[in-house]
Amino acid sequence: MKKIKFYFSLLLILGVAHEGYTKIWTPSILSDNMVLQQNSEVTIWGWTTDTSEKITVIGSWSDSEVTVDAYQGVWSAQITTPKAGGPYTVRIKGHEELMIKNVLIGEVWLASGQSNMEWTPTQGLLNAEEEIKKANYPRIRFFKVDRHTAKFPQDDTPGKWVECTPETMSRFSSIAYFFARNVQDKIEVPMGMISSNWGGTPIETWIPTELINENEELKKAATKIEAKPWWPNDPGMAYNAMIHPLSNFNIAGCIWYQGESNRQNPNAYYTSFPLLIKSWRNLWQSDFSFYFAQIAPFKYGEMDAIDAAIVRDAQLSTMLHTPKTGMAVTNDIGNLENIHPINKQEVGRRLALWALAKDYGLEDLEHSGPIYKSMEIRKNKAVLSFDHAENGLIKKGKHLTSFTIAGPDQVFHPAKAKIVGNTIIVSAKNVKNPKAVRFAFTDTAEPLLYNKEGLPASAFRTDAWIFKNL
């Protein structure tokens, strides 16, 4: 377990440590109503004003006790959790006794990103009134991290665990809720969802400061993000305050929805996104699953702009090259006039498909839409093959749209495309020697290409040509 930093000067400033006053306490993430990860070694930690006392931790699911020595006021114990169940209690004994009540054992996931992950039912949700009314799931628990920043990594953050009720669900991340509900419907275990989001934030503020500053490409790219007074832009500021304090709390994985704010430096997203995943896994010391939503189409400016398309391509590249990641495509449920499309139910469901298939053993469940695999040139036509299209491809509408094709001059032209089994044949009259195909490669593209299971195809490009003037 990572050593938890602690400075008694903070206690003196807060007036906690003074003559005749003693106390044992835990971070806010360890509190009543929490969910602990099942079948694992979880950390129960905290602080004491009796700087070297013995602390004993007992989970009511077991007769075993774990006793540790505090070191300079910091203590940390590892306890083993059983399979899903509860409610239980966790007792912490030293010179005083704490009792954490109504504890469930189940699956814990972190939901993070910018506004589309943060958005609550009251801010915009399809059939919001009905969804809120039926949100009585006491075995789903929420922990919401409030927006705040810090210049240096913190050990605690304000927040509390609550049961899922219509009231609490209405103020929690919609996507996180629907993810949890879909997973719970299939595997029938308690679900703990931690929401740590901040609308508008670029990815850099969620990555440790030193990792941005030591990479010249990312350091330069960070300067391109337009500063706003409503959210942090500086590297590490959200990470320090809203991610680092959670890192001793065992999680099964993370779901992520972010990228719209990185249209100003889209090329850097090919580097920054996998770096974020690696840095968080290093922080937790766990190779946990990381599933994310590809950003939806939206009219940011010109209809044929490609800044957001490049971010989507970087997201696809990250999934293809980073182990234990998965991507939920949203190009069929966006809204060109609303950057916060309201069908959060489907985003949560598509993210849950990845977890159910990859983490929870539902192997016969198709969890992804078609993903471009390879291209073969046959005379003046390009034949495209796909993964996750074994049962064939379908289109919704009369024609396949959003395909372009280019020759050696790297100029892309609108193309005709037709489905043949689980392949697509692409061509254009004025491209006699095709070299590359792109699909849905604009900010506003709303293609309607699916596999037979009804999941949409990701935008893609077959080329690796450098994007100019960005």
Image (cartoon, rainbow, N blue to C red):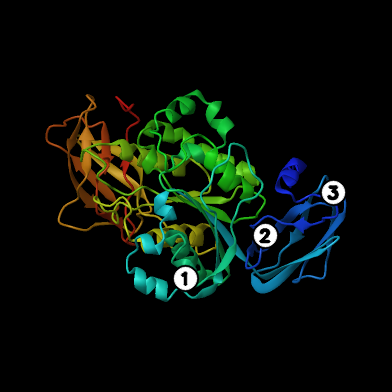
Q: Residue at x 40, y 55 (%)?
A: 368
Label drawn at residue 51: 3
When asked about the image quadrant of residue 378, the answer is: top left
Element on which disc 2 rests: loop
Label drawn at residue 181: none
Q: Residue at x 64, y 61 (%)?
A: 37
Residue at image mark 2: 30
Q: Residue at x 85, y 51 (%)?
A: 19
- Amino acid at pointer 2: Leu
Question: Which badge, 1 or 2, comes first in the chain's sequence?
Answer: 2
Q: Nearer the viewer, mark 3 or mark 2?
A: 3
The crowding category of the residue bearing disc 2, from other C-alpha atoms within 10 Å (few below 14, some 14 to 19, many at least 20), is many
Residue at image mark 1: 167
Q: Contact, CB < 8 Å: mark 1 with mark 3?
A: no
Viewer-proximal residue, 468 or 325?
A: 468
Compute the Cα span from label 1 to label 2: 22 Å
Q: Contact, CB < 8 Å: mark 3 with mark 2?
A: no
Left or right, 422 with respect to 285, comes to left
Q: Residue at x 58, y 70 (%)?
A: 189
Left or right, 158 with respect to 438, comes to right
Q: Position of residue 391 (x, y in %)?
A: 33, 59
Q: Nearer the viewer, mark 1 or mark 2?
A: 1
